Amino acid sequence: MTMKMDQAALSAFMRRDFPQVADDFIIESVTPEELTVRLVVSEKHLRPGGTVSGPTMFGLADVALYLAIQARIGPVALAVTTNCSIDFLRKPAAGRDLVAVARLLKLGRVLAVGDVMLYSIGEPAPVARSGLTYSIPPVQG
Amino acid sequence: MTMKMDQAALSAFMRRDFPQVADDFIIESVTPEELTVRLVVSEKHLRPGGTVSGPTMFGLADVALYLAIQARIGPVALAVTTNCSIDFLRKPAAGRDLVAVARLLKLGRVLAVGDVMLYSIGEPAPVARSGLTYSIPPVQG
Amino acid sequence: MTMKMDQAALSAFMRRDFPQVADDFIIESVTPEELTVRLVVSEKHLRPGGTVSGPTMFGLADVALYLAIQARIGPVALAVTTNCSIDFLRKPAAGRDLVAVARLLKLGRVLAVGDVMLYSIGEPAPVARSGLTYSIPPVQG
Amino acid sequence: MTMKMDQAALSAFMRRDFPQVADDFIIESVTPEELTVRLVVSEKHLRPGGTVSGPTMFGLADVALYLAIQARIGPVALAVTTNCSIDFLRKPAAGRDLVAVARLLKLGRVLAVGDVMLYSIGEPAPVARSGLTYSIPPVQG
């Protein structure tokens, strides 16, 4: 199980292909099985009341596993999210960044599956958990 | 099965409680079992390539069923999303608004469950389908 | 959107490939988009208390969409369930058969997605709803 | 975080309340956060081809988290499954028991949420992963 992009390569890939959101995410660590990414929470991520919104948490989980997959398959073929099931467990702590820990559980020929736990930085209890599936398009030769 | 808020009351409720996003959504119709809401797609909803982003579709499904529940329970107790499973079926058509059709399948004492289909306006094939669960907090007396 | 197996062909396919369970299921109708199948409930499907068990409901939803897919792709390639999200809405009525209505929402080259509603025969309110994804193996030439 | 039933009490609870299936399951370990249960695979759990069926895997995941919850809340109130999302990752190894590792991620007043990983005994790669939600009925006083 080798990686085609390490932390530096993944960060550059994100900056080049997703410039609009690249500043929101900091890749903290990556191994062939697990990737940790931090969401730098700002005004646009909040809903009334000051906690991080549901779509933002969904988006963080999606980005985390997407990056874990791209680390393994490289920057050419781009994984496409086909399914996400997410459980919202607790209200995120106000004024704290979120961190996502993504585990890649299967990387097949056409499908990749993993799960993601989301935490408010510094809190042991997760704020959400998620399982996601991606389809991996064939690389055009 | 009576409603506590009709289309006009729901629109006012959204404008008052969610002023940041109220302009994005137009409630098109509401009955006790089904609610249709349109997302007025703009730049902020798009991802690279020009199609509507995954978090935006998640957010639309979430808003649609939330409004369907609030129509039934009124504006006092606020439903909280506890689970969402979403399947992304097709890339949305570029430059088109999205419409969500939410069906309330169960409205219990503490839980509400429903499903939502998302369409690009004018296209018969859905771009996503979703099942969502909400917890309904007890009304403080 | 043509079908490769009609109701009679599907029933024969089930009897040949799944003889252990073929007697439990009656295919009631099939079109390119929707299939209805009835579970003949017997002792083995019940849990303590006399209502249909969760695994039985899961199995019925799975069979229903599986048959809807096979009706379209024919008896050669066999779809494999990759994901199921199921909401249990109400306790099934005791002593009644269950009926599943499966809708095929996407039939792609490698993935098929649909949803299934489960009912106690004669009751309008669904007992469960489910979204399922299948991978479709390449046909060996 | 204390437990109201330990391994011996849980096994007795299962034997008393679920006599039909109690022999199929062996509770291997239980802590306040995690429970491991083994499915003794027999003929009735298999599908054509000799591997464990989908409904059996669903049922194992469901039992595992159910027992993890009952260990914490005791044998009086009985948790009811409201949602399950399950990803099937690999075909289980033929002729091997399955083991489920359930983690309780949230135990609230009315809802409990957790995830479950399923393995063929002796294999490091999971055969399925699942997230489940249960409603916890109020204890009648």
Image (tube, coloured by chain):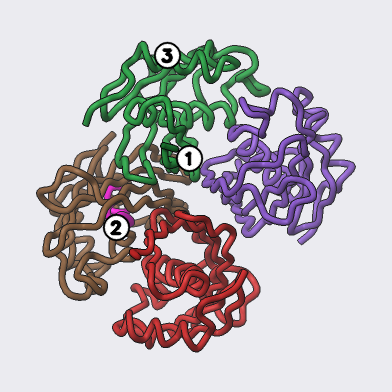
Chain colours: A brown, B red, C purple, D green
**Identity of the amino acid at label 2?**
Val
Q: Is residue D35 left or right of residue C71?
A: left
Residue at the spot 76% in from the left edge and 44% down from the top edge? C74
Alpha carbon separation for disc pair 3 and 2: 42 Å
| Circle 3 residue | D11
Labels 3 and 1 within one chain: yes
Alpha carbon separation for disc pair 3 and 1: 25 Å
Report the chain holding disc 1.
D
Q: Could you tell me if residue D132 is visible in this image?
A: no
Mark 2 falls on what kind of element?
Answer: helix
Residue C14's x, y, as percent?
79, 33
Q: Which residues are magenta?
A: A61-68
| Circle 1 residue | D86
| Circle 2 residue | A63
Nearest to viewer (mark 3 / mark 1): 3
Q: Is residue C19 left or right of residue A85?
A: right
